[in-house]
């Protein structure tokens, strides 16, 4: 999925850092951003439906139509999703021939558990998705069953997300150019909240009048 827009809390960080510099206070060494589950849900909603690539064997388009019931536990995010597709075909090789099986329409509701941990040494977020199945498997179409099998196979595989080279954020305040570089110190979760510990470094340059 697309990265959640950071502009809101980046703006807050900039304001705090610039205010501190004007007040001649020592630079802020670490900040913790607290993101409630409800805020994650609100941030995701405008991004949907979101087109995804399931695999080269599928012909047609899949979309994440909804992400609901977001709950955050210790280093784990629980949620349910609906993935849909229309006029889907599945290509497979039999001998030297490629056969396209008509799958048709897909509307797959699935529950997920997303475990994660932050590798502080290599600055990577290690994400482990796990499909928890669906309550409506008895009503699955052929396409739903095929996609469910594939998504289940994706579970149990840890995917690294590199967070070592975040782009700086620049903004103008009072005729000064403020450049904010942020390094992530830790990411963890609990009590229905996501916690991101940041190490900010600010550079202030006066603009030419």
Image: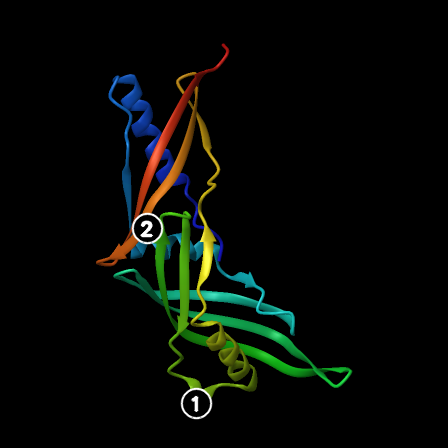
Query: Residue sitting at 46 percent across and 77 percent down?
Result: 152
Name the residue rendered at 52%, 81% in the picture.
Answer: 144
Residue 92, how many percent across, how many down? 68, 81
> x%, y% of residue 64?
50, 66
Q: Position of residue 180 (x, y in %)?
A: 41, 30
Towards the viewer: 178 or 82: 178
143 to the left or right of 189: right
Query: Disc 2 to disc 1, how far (Cα)?
Result: 38 Å
Frontmost of labels 2 and 1 is 2
> Of 7 and 204, which appears nearest the observer?
204
- Where residue 89 appears, x then y in whole percent? 66, 78
- 10 Å neighbourhood of mark 2: few (<14), some, or many (≥20)? some
Farthest residue to the bottom: give it.
138
The residue that appears at 38% across and 39% down in the rendered structure is 183
Q: Residue at x 65, y 70 (%)?
A: 56
Q: Which residue is mark 1?
A: 138
Q: Please identify the residue farthest to the left as the structure is shown.
A: 191
Query: Do the numbered discs 2 and 1 sit on residues whose CB atoms are within 8 Å?
Result: no
Mark 1 neighbour class, 10 Å CA radius: few under 14, some 14 to 19, many 20 or more: few
**191 left or right of 208 in image:** left
**In the image, residue 128 above or below residue 32:** below
Q: Which mark is residue 9?
A: none
**Residue labelled with disc 2:** 187
Describe residue 153's horizontal placement relative to residue 133 as left or right: right
Q: How many marks?
A: 2
Which quadrant of the figure has residue 54? bottom right
Q: Is residue 8 above or below residue 179?
A: below
The local secondary structure at tag 2 comes to strand
């Amino acid at each position: 999925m697309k990265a959640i827009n950071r502009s809101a809390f980046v703006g807050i960080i900039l304001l705090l850092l610039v205010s501190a510099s004007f007040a001649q206070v020592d630079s802020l060494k670490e900040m913790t951003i607290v993101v409630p589950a409800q805020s994650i849900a609100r941030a995701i909603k405008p991004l949907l439906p979101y087109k995804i690539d399931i695999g080269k064997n599928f012909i047609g388009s899949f979309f994440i139509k909804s992400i609901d019931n977001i709950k955050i536990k210790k280093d784990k995010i629980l949620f349910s999703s609906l993935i849909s597709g229309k006029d889907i075909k599945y290509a497979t090789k039999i001998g030297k021939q490629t056969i396209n099986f008509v799958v048709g329409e897909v509307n797959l509701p699935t529950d997920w558990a997303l475990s994660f941990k932050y590798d502080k040494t290599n600055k990577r977020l290690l994400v482990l998705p796990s499909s928890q199945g669906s309550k409506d498997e008895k009503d699955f179409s052929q396409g739903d069953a095929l996609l469910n099998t594939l998504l289940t196979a994706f579970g149990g595989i840890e995917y690294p997300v590199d967070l070592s080279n975040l782009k700086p954020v620049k903004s103008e305040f009072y005729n000064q150019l403020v450049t904010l570089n942020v390094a992530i110190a830790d990411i963890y979760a609990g009590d229905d909240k996501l916690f991101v510990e940041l190490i900010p470094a600010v550079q202030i340059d006066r603009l030419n009048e």
